[in-house]
Amino acid sequence: MTMGAQASIARGDGTAQELYRPPETERRLSLAFITVGFAHLAVGILLGLLQGLQHAGIDLYAYVPFVRHYYQGLAMHGVFNVLVFTTFFIGGFLFFVAGYGFRRPLVTSGLAWTTFWLMTAGLLLVDWALLTNQASVLYTSYAPLQAHPAYYLGLVLVVVGTWLQLVILLRTFFAWRRENPGKRTPLIAFGALVTLIMWTMASAGIAVQFVGFLLPWSLGWMQGIDPLLSRTLFWFTGHPIVYFWLLPAYISWYFMLPRQVGGRLFSESLARLAFLLFIPLSLPVGFHHQYLDPGVSEGYKAIHAFLTFAVFMPSAMTAFTVLASIETGGRARGGQGRLGWLLRLPWRDPSVAAQLLAMVLFAFGGISGLINASFTVNLVVHNTLFVPGHFHLTVGTASALTFMGIVYWLVPYLSGRRLFSPRMGVWQAWLWFVGMTIMSRGMSWAGVLGAPRRTALGTAPYFAAEWTVPTWLTAIGGAVLTISGLLFFINLIGTLTASPRAEKLEVPVVESAPDGQDPVPGWLDRFAPWVTATAVLVLISYGPTLYRLFGEMSLTIPGLRPY
Amino acid sequence: MDIDRYERLWIMLSAAVLLSLFLALVYSVYALDIRLVDDAGQVDPATAAQTPPFDEPGVYQEGPGRYRVVMVARAWSFQPAEVRVPAGSDVTFQVTSLDVIHGFRVPYTTINQMLIPGQVSEFRFRFAEPGEHYLFCHEYCGVGHHTMQGRIVVETAATGAR
Ligand code: HEM
Ligand SMILES: [Cu+2]
Ligand SMILES: [Cu+2]
């Protein structure tokens, strides 16, 4: 079949590519980012287990010296897993794929190290505030709950670091363009640029919220705060941030995984289009987190609901292109029939197994996301455990398990050591899949029965009898996930400390389509039009509400620390 | 740009499914009258307890089968903590928070609201059947969050004048 031929052509081309190896300082930089991120995930997972057990009536908080109560633990679980682990892993990964994609050193790796230390310094402030119970406001930072200024300042530094990252990537991009006139941006580097361009625009909301309000207010320079305005600014960033977590996984699914399974990218044009669509469509949807907020008009909520359905489209396109690309691999490996190719995929490769399983659960995450997005249906599930049931499938699996899958080849590449145990990696991936299926099922079920999220359910006086079985599922799934997490960390530490040196290791990257085949139009390799479209959409969807909220703003409501 | 035949079909199908789901929502709003809270005014939480209607939280009859419930939420209680209305009443809730953000949730109804200090939440529900509902706060509001609850008792209509 032609597919097999193409796969081997791609492999032939690949050997020329593998000659490029990023400078050692860049490899160490990515490794540093990834290590800090995963160290925080380790703590986060432990706290997740405690939460799951608490819901089932088993309260272990008394035995954990560094957590005073459920909500301090929950604040750390949320911040560590979803703000720290993601941002730091993504930092290391994007620097790597940009450098590798452009096949040139970053401009400059000195600035990139400064970025790392700036973000780490911010992170230490955040860690300190959380550990001393001075920031138990949960990762959403909803005012008038108030945290120690160090917490807000620390998070600001982390975000500033992500902006510096965009600056470094853009400078590297311009340098590459001067050296390679007329060439299309290499796919993985293109993905990295889209991710950071989208994120930098999206982060304007929390930038204003933190620097303009939360930080001066927590320092006492500002008497009070406007909770609705603060919350609105948070969700301006709070939805697009999920695409900041997801797009790096998409970079791997589109541009790396097909090669890991011996296939090719099915459609380069549609892959680029899907990425670019995320720039304008990620932002104007934040009100879907505020459907039930007073003070925001129903009409604008409806506009955001519509646009939320629209941002589902690039993910629907992704489902097709990525599956078709993986199919080319399964067929090249001799897979036959409608579904026979699935079995021929290299399931024994832990990196492949983790990512394929992450995709399966992501499909369910997408469907539960549509339920949340559904305006009136959301009345049934808003702020119930259905919501964590949803996002443990998306960020907690589609992103987290994919990132673990990436680690299985990337950390050996960066450290020059073989993966400690590929078998253990495969077990880890399947245990995560099974554990998450059970836990998410439990949470979603409890949520539909009305159980609230962000609540120490095990000690809630209104705990309903029908929540018993679902909360047990949550606890059992959480325990399986914790074992999976443990296996992952044993493998990671084993690789870094006890594994033999590896010979030549490969970076799996698919080829751009050769010219002539699948012609890629120029507008799919430009960013400016998409950035302009974003500005227009944001102005329409957010402009009037923000204008009114700033106009009516009253900075009188004092901060409280009831924790 | 070449698009594969099946991929084109998949994209059109996805768009069609999404559009029909959205139209179902439009239907739920206009035909089933399930509405979301809108902008119902502002109130300063510092003086809300002295400002009508929040200076006198309680249950008020507004007409035959129509009630208004004025409530305030603070860490970690609702006032009034118990609401009694006859079955078959249309109840309008008017609620605000005096300190941090709280939630207002009555399971098995469409009552699900955020209470944001500075803002007034106004929403309606028709309690058709007699029975007892529990209501609780579903937004983290401090260490006592999971104890913040109330009750809605829907009484058999016999006592209430028709
Ligand atoms: C061992 C694995 C895990 C377990 C057992 C676990 C368990 C839980 C539970 C029970 C909750 C609900 C707490 C509540 O609403 O009261 C929760 C919340 C949450 N989890 Fe996990 N989780 C795990 C892994 C993850 C991962 C990998 C991520 C993301 C990368 C994640 C992100 C979150 C977030 C953001 C919340 C919400 C925090 C909040 O509401 O402020 N979790 N988790
Ligand atoms: Cu969202
Ligand atoms: Cu609460």
Image: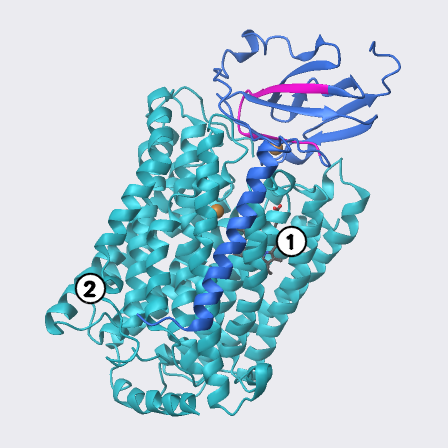
Left or right: A321, with A460 as reference point: left
Quadrant of the image containing the N terminus of chain A: bottom left
The reply to whether the magenta stretch includes residue B40 is no
Q: What residue type is labelled 1?
A: Leu
**Residue shown at 10% from the left, 69% from the top:** A178
How many numbered dots are placed on residues in this image? 2
For the question of whether residue A469 can be seen, the reply is yes
Reply above or below: B100 against A51.
Answer: above
Mark 2 Cα-neighbour bin, 10 Å: few <14, some 14–19, many ≥20: few
**Which residues are the magenta region?**
B90-106
**x and y, in percent, of residue A328 in the image:** 45, 83
**Residue shown at 50% from the left, 78% from the top:** A352
**SS assignment at label 2:** helix
- Colour chain B is painted in: blue
The reply to whether the magenta stretch includes residue B99 is yes
**SS assignment at label 1:** helix
Q: Which chain carries label 2?
A: A
**x and y, in percent, of residue A334 in the image:** 52, 92
**What label sits on residue A110 in the rendered view?**
2
Q: What residue type is labelled 2?
A: Gly
Reply above or below: A315 against B30.
Answer: below
Q: Which residue position holds label 1? A: A50
